[in-house]
Image (spheres, rainbow, N blue to C red):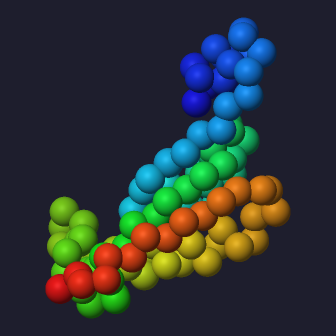
């Protein structure tokens, strides 16, 4: 985003960043605010069904589950007062 913002400034155009993520690392409060400050305003978080299905399909490399942390990160974004769009994509038939 730094590079994109520098080009946009040079040509006097507006930019808006978009990111698609599983939300595990990128949506803790500090990183989320940094992304907003850099111009990322549209977020899509993907979840593979209910907790059990998601954790089975998307574990960490060490086998630990990820759903609870992702959900916690999503809840924390409610406290951010900046303007942004959050899309949550849930895979319906995850098994």
> On the image, which quarter does residue 74 sit in?
bottom right
Q: Quadrant of the N terminus?
A: top right
Residue occupying image coordinates x 23% and y 82%? 94
The answer to whether residue 9 is above or below residue 41 is above
On the rendered image, what quadrant is the C terminus found in?
bottom left
Q: Is residue 95 above or below residue 86?
A: below
Q: Residue furthest top?
A: 10
Left or right of 56 in this view: 34:
right
Is 87 in front, or is 73?
A: 87
At which x and y percent is residue 76?
64, 73
Instruction: Indicate whether 3 appears above or below 11.
Output: below
Seen in the image, is 10 located left or right of residue 40?
right
Q: Is residue 25 left or right of residue 54?
A: right
Q: Residue at x 66, y 68 (%)?
A: 77
Is 5 above or below relative to 62?
Answer: above
User: What is the x, y in percent for residue 83?
Assistant: 77, 56
Question: In the rendered image, is residue 60 in sight?
Answer: yes
- Which percent across, then down, holds residue 53? 24, 86
């Amino acid at each position: 985003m730094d590079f994109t913002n520098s080009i946009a400034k040079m040509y006097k155009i507006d930019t808006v960043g978009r990111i698609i993520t599983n939300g595990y690392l990128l949506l803790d409060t500090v990183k989320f605010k940094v992304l907003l400050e850099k111009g990322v305003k549209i977020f899509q978080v993907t979840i593979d069904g209910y907790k059990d299905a998601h954790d089975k399909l998307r574990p960490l490399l060490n086998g630990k589950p990820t759903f609870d942390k992702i959900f916690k990160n999503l809840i924390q974004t409610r406290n951010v007062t900046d303007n942004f769009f959050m899309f949550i994509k849930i895979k319906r038939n995850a098994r």
